[in-house]
Image (spheres, rainbow, N blue to C red):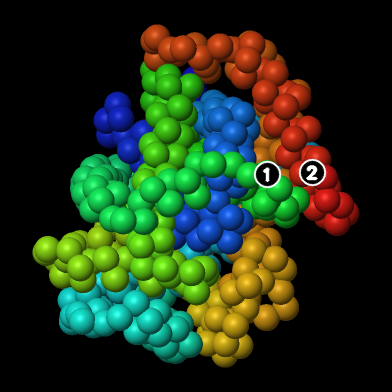
């Protein structure tokens, strides 16, 4: 029956998919973006909304994406066309375009982490006050050429690993790096939680006050659930297409979502005690990761080395996510146009690099620090803001909405049950998932997008 099973490259081990998918999910979204979005959206209510979005919308849609990918063994455009006919191929296309846009600015921020590895090594933070550390960040992001340099290097490494293919490049990197990242994060959490501001940080994070969350904040929480889980653009579909038939899709989706969420919360537990303890209120910005951590590193024993290690690992976490973004774009040309992996990776990666220079250059050219207040809201200044806003808040949720509709209403029950029944024991309930994917996810995502588009407050 599975003629397509033959010939497609597969993950090298049973947990290959989980490793690679967790590598895709865990990245700058967790470590850089979630903390500052939590900050700009005033904590508790945003965090709770995010968690509910992950559970009720993210997990079901991740399961849907993996079903589509593993069933067809194709990347998004081919997969959608195969199961839904030509009428649905646009949804695959939307994913390719979204991946292109996200990677273009993602790589720029990943470049910041490389700069911070070097800053750590050269001891740039030693004996610096929190204000001076913030100023270093300000100076750096207003230097477009340094940013282009790191952006180029990061895209180069990403392309190199994607050239290595599924087993060699992608899986091997994730297998080594993810566990180290996890350990170092736990150590940092312990240090932060022993600070004087830890109590206030925990209250800020976990005491929801819904009067503080705007309608736009709702959309941001939802959009970020998609962004953080790598959903809505076919990354999980593509990785699912390399998954073995005998693995459990629901278990894999649950594991990946749980890991991703835990890391995001832990990142907040590292950053917010520092913010509260040192009263870093003015750094309420997209720079929060880069302006808070050096402060604490310099106050802890061995901080010099921790700083190097930490920013290196953030760069690696970004790398395993960037790989999945490029893989979606590149595999379209491999699967649909029969380009070889090399040609496809070099051409698409090169184009993404060029497009990304817009973001790197606009950071400095328009003095985008002055726009921090507008972060997350559309702004004419700074491609960076605009692309991130567009991708996270519209393209991914819209992609996810239609993936839910497609899976819920077009795919047959027998196909879904067949894909969901493999891989042994699971706590998964088909009927619950069915309701979430058919009704809840489409309605909730649709309402939130429409409400914000129509400019209505709805709380
Ligand atoms: N999930 C990744 C992160 O949190 C980003 C990403 C988004 C990767 C979409 C792939 C697809 O950093």
User: Which residue is painted at 70% across and 66% down in the image?
Assistant: 377
Q: Image check: 194 left or right of 378?
A: left
How many neighbours does mark 1 have within 10 angstroms: few (below 14), some (14-19), or many (20 or more)? some
Q: Is residue 80 left or right of residue 273?
A: right
Q: Nearer the viewer, residue 225 or 105?
A: 225
Instruction: Pick the residue in front: 439 or 459.
Output: 459
> CB of residue at label 2: within 8 Å of ligand 1?
no
The answer to whether any part of residue 17 appears in the image is: no
Location of residue 411 by image quarter: top right
> Which percent across, then down, holds residue 441?
70, 31
Any atom of ligand 1 within 8 Å of the CB at mark 1?
no
Q: Dot 2 lies on which element?
A: loop
From the top left corner, tell me how far across and down residue 383 is, in percent.
Answer: 63, 75
What numbered label is drawn on residue 165? none
Instruction: Name the quadrant containing residue 307.
Output: bottom left
Estimate the x, y position of residue 347 in percent, counting from the top left. 48, 68
Q: Position of residue 245 (x, y in %)?
A: 42, 21
Specify the quadrant of the image occupied by residue 454.
Answer: bottom right
**Residue at x 29%, y 71% (from the top left corner):** 295
Mark 1 sits on what residue? 210
C-alpha span from label 1 to label 2:
9 Å
Residue receiving disc 2: 459
């Amino acid at each position: 029956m599975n003629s397509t099973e033959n010939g497609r490259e597969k993950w090298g081990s049973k947990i290959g998919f989980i490793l690679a998918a967790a590598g895709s999910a865990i990245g700058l979204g967790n470590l850089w973006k979630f903390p500052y979005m939590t900050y700009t959206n005033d904590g508790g209510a945003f965090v709770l909304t995010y968690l509910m979005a992950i559970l009720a919308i993210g997990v079901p849609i991740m399961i849907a994406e993996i079903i589509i990918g593993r069933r067809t063994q194709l990347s998004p455009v081919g997969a959608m066309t195969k199961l839904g006919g030509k009428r649905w191929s646009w949804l695959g296309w939307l994913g390719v375009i979204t991946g292109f846009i996200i990677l273009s600015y993602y790589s720029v921020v990943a470049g910041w982490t490389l700069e911070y590895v070097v800053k750590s090594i050269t001891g740039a933070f030693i004996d610096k006050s929190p204000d001076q550390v913030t100023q270093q960040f300000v100076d750096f992001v207003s230097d477009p050429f340094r940013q282009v340099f790191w952006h180029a290097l990061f895209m180069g490494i990403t392309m190199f690993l994607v050239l290595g293919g599924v087993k060699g490049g992608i899986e091997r990197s994730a297998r080594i790096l993810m566990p180290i990242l996890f350990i170092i994060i736990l150590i940092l959490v312990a240090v932060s939680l022993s600070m004087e501001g830890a109590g206030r940080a925990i209250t800020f994070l976990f005491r929801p006050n819904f009067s503080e969350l705007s309608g736009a904040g709702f959309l941001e929480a939802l959009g970020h659930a998609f962004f953080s889980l790598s959903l809505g653009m076919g990354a999980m579909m593509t990785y699912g297409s390399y998954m073995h038939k005998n693995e459990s899709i629901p278990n894999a989706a649950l594991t990946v979502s749980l890991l991703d969420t835990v890391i995001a919360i832990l990142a907040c537990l590292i950053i917010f005690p520092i913010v509260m303890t040192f009263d870093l209120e003015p750094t309420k910005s997209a720079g929060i990761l880069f302006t808070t951590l050096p402060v604490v590193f310099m106050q802890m024993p061995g901080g010099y080395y921790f700083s190097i290690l930490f920013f290196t690992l953030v760069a690696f976490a970004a790398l395993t996510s960037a790989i999945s973004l490029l893989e979606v774009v590149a595999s379209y040309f491999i699967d649909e146009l029969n380009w070889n992996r090399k040609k496809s990776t070099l051409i698409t990666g090169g184009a993404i690099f060029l497009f990304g220079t817009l973001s790197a250059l606009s950071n400095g050219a328009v003095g985008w620090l002055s726009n921090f207040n507008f972060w997350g809201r559309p702004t004419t200044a700074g491609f960076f803001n605009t692309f991130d806003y567009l991708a996270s808040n519209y393209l991914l949720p819209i992609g996810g909405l239609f993936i839910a509709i497609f899976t819920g209403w077009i795919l047959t029950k027998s196909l879904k049950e067949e894909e969901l029944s493999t891989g042994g024991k699971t706590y998964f309930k088909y009927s619950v998932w069915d309701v979430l994917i058919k009704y809840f996810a489409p309605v909730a995502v649709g309402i939130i997008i429409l409400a914000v588009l129509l400019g209505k407050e709805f709380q």
